[in-house]
Image (tube, grey):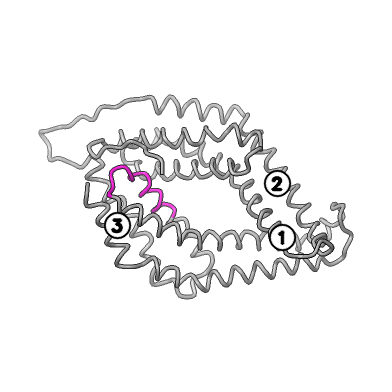
Amino acid sequence: MSIIGLQPTQSLTQAGRKVFAHHFHDLTACERDVRSGDNIEAIHDMRVATRRFRAAIHIFAAGFSTSSLKFLQKGLKKTAKMLGTVRDLDVFLEKLGIYQQQFPLAEQTELAPLLEYFDLQREIARAKLLSYLESAAYEKFKTKTTHFLRQEHDVVIDKSRKPTPFQIAHIAPALIYKRYEAIRVYEPFLIDASVELLHQLRIDFKHFRYTLENFHDILGGESTVVLADVKKIQNHLGDLNDARVACELVQDFLQHWKQYRKKIATTRAKKPIAVIDYLNVKLAEKDLLSETFPQAWHHFNSNKLRLNLALSIAVI
C-alpha cells in the first residue's frame, strides 16, 4: 500500500489536500498507458484512482467549502463514467473468453457473435474515452485541480472559544466508525437480500476500505488485517456484480438479436443457442454468489475483526 505521509496532528484540510494530491498523481500517471492501450490494466488502475479520489472528497469534505469541491466532484464523476464503461466491457470480454476456451474449437465459434458485438462496443467506448481525455473539459479539470492542490491554508485556532476537533487524530476514529456503521446496518437484511441491495453494500464496503486506506499512515498495524478481510468480502461482491452486469449485457444482446444478427459478419443463425447457454451460466453464477453471501458475511462480521479495528484506531 502506498504511503501518503499523513501525520496525526495535521488538520482535516491539510490531510485532505495531501490525500487528494496522492490520488490525483495516481490518476494522471495512468493516462499514458490508457491512451496507448498497451496495458489493459491501466484503465482499471485509473478507474480505481478516480474512485479513491471521489471517496476521499467525502471523507475530508468538512475541511473545505462546498463550492471549492464542486469542480472536483464533477470532473471525477465524468472521468469515472468514461473509464467505467470500457472497464465493464473489458471484464465481460475477459470472462467470456475464459468460458469460451472450455469448449472444442468447433463449438467456440458459436459464441463468436457475442464476442464480435461486444468487441465493437468496447472499441466505441474506448474511442469516446480517448476523445474525452483529449478534450478541453478534461484539460481544464486537471489544470484547476493542480491549482487547487497547490493552495495552502494555515489553521487558525481561536483560543477564546471552546476547542473543536480539527486534527485528524481526533476526527479519523469517528469517520472510520461512521463507514463501519454504514456496513453493519445491512446485517438484519442479508438473508435473501436482493442483488440490488448487495450492490449497494458493495459500494459501502468500498467507502469503508478507502477510508481505512486513506488513514493507513496513522493507524496501527491491525488495519492491514482488517483490510485483508474487507478485500475478501469485496471480491465476493465484486464477482456478484460482474455476473449481474454480464447478465444485463447478454439479455440486452438477446432481446435485440434480430437487429444485431444482420450486422454481425460471423452468423446468420436465427437462434443463438450458445449465447443463451452462456446467459444461463451467468444467471446461475449470480444466484449462487447471492445465496452464499451470508456465509461470507459471517466470516467478516466477527469479534476478531472488531477488535483489530479498535486496536488499529487506538494508537492515534
Q: Amino acid at mark 3?
A: Leu
Q: Badge 1 is on which residue? A: 252
Q: Quadrant of residue 62?
A: top left
CA gap, disc 1 and disc 3: 43 Å
Residue 285, position as x, y percentages in the image: 61, 69
Camera-side mark, 1 or 2: 2
Q: Where does the magenta region start and end?
A: 206-220
Secondary structure type for disc 2: helix
> Is residue 79 left or right of 9 when viewed as pictured?
right
Q: How crowded is the residue under tag 1: few (<14 C-alpha within 10 Å), some, or many (20+)?
A: few
Residue 161, position as x, y percentages in the image: 12, 37
Whether residue 71 is visible, yes or no, is no
Q: Badge 2 is on which residue? A: 122
Which residue is more in the foreground, 191 or 95? Answer: 95
Whether pointer 1 and pointer 2 mark residues with C-beta atoms closer than 8 Å, the reply is: no
Residue 117, position as x, y percentages in the image: 77, 52
Mark 2 or mark 1, which is nearer the start of the sequence? 2
Q: Badge 3 is on which residue? A: 309
Residue 279, position as x, y percentages in the image: 70, 67
| Magenta part, dominant SS | helix
Q: Quadrant of residue 127?
A: top right
Which residue is more in the foreground, 16 or 115? Answer: 115
